[in-house]
Image: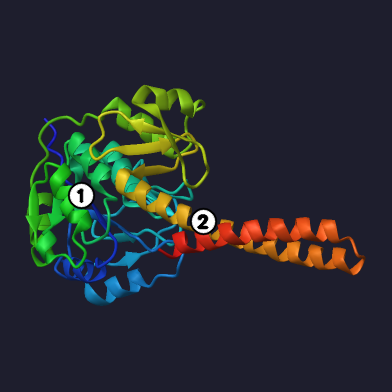
């Protein structure tokens, strides 16, 4: 009989306020840590020195990997700016697939891909951050037999992400950041019991997110229902995923949102749209004043009065809209 498998993949997600606990965690890992460590820190497209910081603090080598690099135990792989970091066939994969939870890199794609690829060999960790990216990914890890650790919200600079993870996931440990490395060291030494099992709907959702299905709308129909909401990024219909807690949404191009991130994205887009509308009203009013002046110069007074009347009408609406967006 072959020896039991070991947990050999640790995936970590963090956002606002996560750099310090991340440095503490990595700094406390032993030099011969027997698992690969993959990290997503919300950095968007901006430059990052996170691998350099981790190399200074810890004893494990950290890097931005190239796509296709094989996973090695005791090595830390950090998601590069503006790229999702995924796990597939014993290697890392970098993609510019659609944003999830208004982020790229995002935590959920990494956790989901790790759960599908490695099943019960995965340990997921959620650190400080806003909103709830990582909750669905941590649920995927648990559904595939893996383990989940959450930073104690009372220990987190920004407690939203760990609090939501604790509330919606049957986590195995809630710990201050200073204790997470010790817990990981114990967990990776434990044998994995039971055969891996991946829910079909998880595979279907992952295939949609990576563009690996021929008919994403039909696939979405299998795991959700069309809502009356549209995607803030591409204006496509959003499907509400069935039985998701907290509620989650996907469009057929691959964008994904929890209800918290959708609320934030719609709020941002609404704000931008209102300011654009105000600009358009003010510019239209200004042009009509110029048109009225031109009419008067050629003594076309009726046309000038009509242009001024329309400009006055727009000025009233612009003032009302100014009060709305300022409030």
Q: Nearer the viewer, residue 282 or 10?
A: 282
Residue occupying the point 8% across, 61% down:
182
Location of residue 123 with respect to 176 vertically, above or below: above
Cα–Cα span, label 2 and label 1: 40 Å
Quadrant assignment for the N terminus: top left
Residue 185 higher or lower than 114, as above or below: below
Q: Residue at x 22, y 71 (%)?
A: 20
Which residue occupies 37% across, 29% down? Answer: 204
Q: Earlier in the sequence, mark 2 or mark 1?
A: 1
In the rendered structure, the answer to whether residue 184 lies left or right of residue 70 reads: left
Q: For the residue labelled by badge 2, is the local secondary structure a helix, a strand or a loop?
A: helix
- Counting other residues with Cα less than 10 Å from the Cα at mark 2, is it few (<14), some (14-19), or many (20 or more)? some
User: Any mark on residue 124, and which?
Assistant: 1
Q: Which residue, as the protein is rendered here, is positioned at the far right? A: 298
Nearest the eye: 114 or 166? 166
Residue 228, image x, y percentages: 42, 32
Q: Secondary structure at mark 1?
A: strand
Taking the spot 29% from the left edge, 36% from the top edge, the residue there is 116
Compare residues 197 and 34 and report the one nearer the observer.
197
- In the figure, 251 relative to 294: above or below? above
Q: Please name the colour scheme applied to the rendered image.
A: rainbow
Expressed as whole percent of the image width and height from the top left, the position of residue 295 reads 86, 63
Q: Residue furthest bottom?
A: 56
Whether residue 274 is visible here, answered yes or no, is yes
Mark linked to residue 107: none
State the image coordinates of residue 39 (x, y, percent, origin top left): 30, 58
Mark number displayed over residue 274:
2
Looking at the image, which is closer to me, 320 or 1? 320
Please identify the quarter of the rendering in which residue 185 is found: bottom left
Q: Is the C terminus in the top left, top right, bottom left or bottom right quadrant?
A: bottom left
Q: Position of residue 25 (x, y in %)?
A: 17, 66
- CA neighbours of label 1 inside 10 A, class few (<14), some (14 to 19), many (20+): many
């Amino acid at each position: 009989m072959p020896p039991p498998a070991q947990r050999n993949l640790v995936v970590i997600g963090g956002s606002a306020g996560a750099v310090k606990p991340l440095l503490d965690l990595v700094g406390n890992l032993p030099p011969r840590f027997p698992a690969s460590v993959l990290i997503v820190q919300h950095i968007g497209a901006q430059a990052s020195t996170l691998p350099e910081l981790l190399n200074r603090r810890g004893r494990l080598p950290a890097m931005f990997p190239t796509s296709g690099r094989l996973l090695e135990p005791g090595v830390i792989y950090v998601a590069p700016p503006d790229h999702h970091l995924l796990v597939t066939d014993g290697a890392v994969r970098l993609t510019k697939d659609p944003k999830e939870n208004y982020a790229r890199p995002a935590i959920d794609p990494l956790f989901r891909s790790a759960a599908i690829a490695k099943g019960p060999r995965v340990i997921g960790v959620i650190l400080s951050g806003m909103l709830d990216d990582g909750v669905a990914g941590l649920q995927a890890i648990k559904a595939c037999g893996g383990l989940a650790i959450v930073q104690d919200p009372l220990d987190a600079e920004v407690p939203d992400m760990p609090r939501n993870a604790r509330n919606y996931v049957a986590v195995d440990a809630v710990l201050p950041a200073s204790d997470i490395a010790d817990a990981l060291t114990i967990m990776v030494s434990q044998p994995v019991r039971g055969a891996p099992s991946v829910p079909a709907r998880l595979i279907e959702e992952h295939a949609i997110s990576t563009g690996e299905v021929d008919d994403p709308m039909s696939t979405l129909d299998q795991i959700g229902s069309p809502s009356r909401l549209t995607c803030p990024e591409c204006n496509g219909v959003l499907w509400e995923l069935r039985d998701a807690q907290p509620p989650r949404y996907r469009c057929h191009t691959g964008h994904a949102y929890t209800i918290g991130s959708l609320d934030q994205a719609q709020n941002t887009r609404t704000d931008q749209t209102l300011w654009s509308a105000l600009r358009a009203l003010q510019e239209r009013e200004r042009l009509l004043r110029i048109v009225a002046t031109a009419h008067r110069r050629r003594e076309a007074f009726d046309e000038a009065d009509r242009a001024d009347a329309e400009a006055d009408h727009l000025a009233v609406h612009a003032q009302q809209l100014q009060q709305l967006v300022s409030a």
